[in-house]
Image (cartoon, helix red, strand yellow):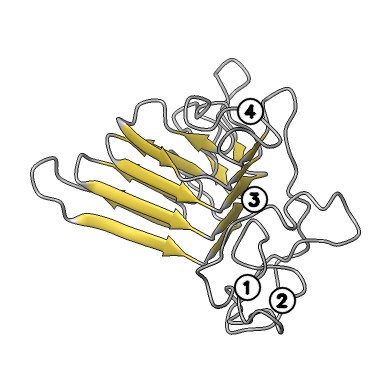
Amino acid sequence: ENGNGGAIHLFGSSTINLATVNIFRSTLTKNTAKHDGGAVSISGGGSNTTINHTTIVDNIADSDASGLGNGGGINTSNGSLTVFNSIVASNQDRSPASNRIFDDIYSLNSPSVTNNGFNFIGNNVGSFTTFPAGAPNANNDYVGTSLAKLDPDLGLYGDNGGPTETLIPLTNGTLAVIDKGSCASEPHDQRLLGNNISKKRVVDLNGVPNGA
């Protein structure tokens, strides 16, 4: 909490690639960072991060409201980031109102951010060049803006089956992330459950499909 990356902080060298991570079928929530990246902070030229089938919600950057932090969900600077079929939403950048607020992803200083599609981004301020607004956009993403934020409408973090706690999409809400994703190659979700008929996970926009 006292630095960068409330859950994960990667720092690589520009000459030697030592910081590489694949965040896969995971849930990152309720993390805080005093500075950048409430959940994930990526810095240094040798930092390479891939985020697939993952949920990143309810994390906080700049927890002391000093104005020195960005990216309530993810902050990336001078490293590479690739995102596919993931939710990054409902995070907070607690910078003062006099600063620009980057709630979900701050990537404007990063030379390499790749959007592989089927993502749900609540607020694209700080990442609009990679994640243009739309419901869906041309990449099959659902992306909100500062004036029209999108809520993934997830339930409480807890035991929804499987070896780890998860956030499951609600069926009595907006259905914001249900049947919006892409995961034909995945045999199961974060809970290690698959669809009873197809033996594949269903296509919700995170690591935990509803009803699999």
What is the C-alpha distance between the residues marked 2 and 4?
29 Å
Which tag, 3 or 2, sits closer to the chain's start? 3
Question: On the rendered structure, is 96 left or right of 71?
Answer: right
Q: Which residue lies at the image location 52% right of the left edge and 71% below the top edge?
A: 186
Q: Which residue lies at the image location 82% right of the left edge and 61% below the top edge?
A: 170
What is the C-alpha distance between the residues marked 3 and 4?
21 Å
| Residue 195 sits in quarter | bottom right
Amino acid at the residue labelled 3: Asp
Instruction: Decide if residue 2 is in sight here.
Output: no
Instruction: Decide if residue 26 is in sight here.
Output: yes
Which tag, 3 or 1, sits closer to the chain's start? 3
Q: Outermost residue toward the left? A: 15
Badge 4 element = loop
Task: Report the residue marked by disc 3.
Answer: 58
Q: Which residue lies at the image location 69% right of the left edge and 52% below the top edge?
A: 180
Amino acid at the residue labelled 4: Ala
Question: On the rendered structure, is 147 left or right of 182?
Answer: right
Task: Report the residue marked by disc 1.
Answer: 201
| Dot label at residue 133 | 4
Amino acid at the residue labelled 2: Ala
Relative image position of residue 131 (x, y in whole percent): 53, 32
Task: Report the residue marked by disc 2.
Answer: 212
Relative image position of residue 40 (x, y in whole percent): 44, 50
What is the C-alpha distance between the residues marked 3 and 1?
25 Å
Q: Which residue lies at the image location 52% right of the left edge and 66% below the top edge?
A: 26
Which tag, 2 or 4, sits closer to the chain's start? 4
Badge 3 element = loop
Q: In the rendered image, which quarter contains the C terminus?
A: bottom right
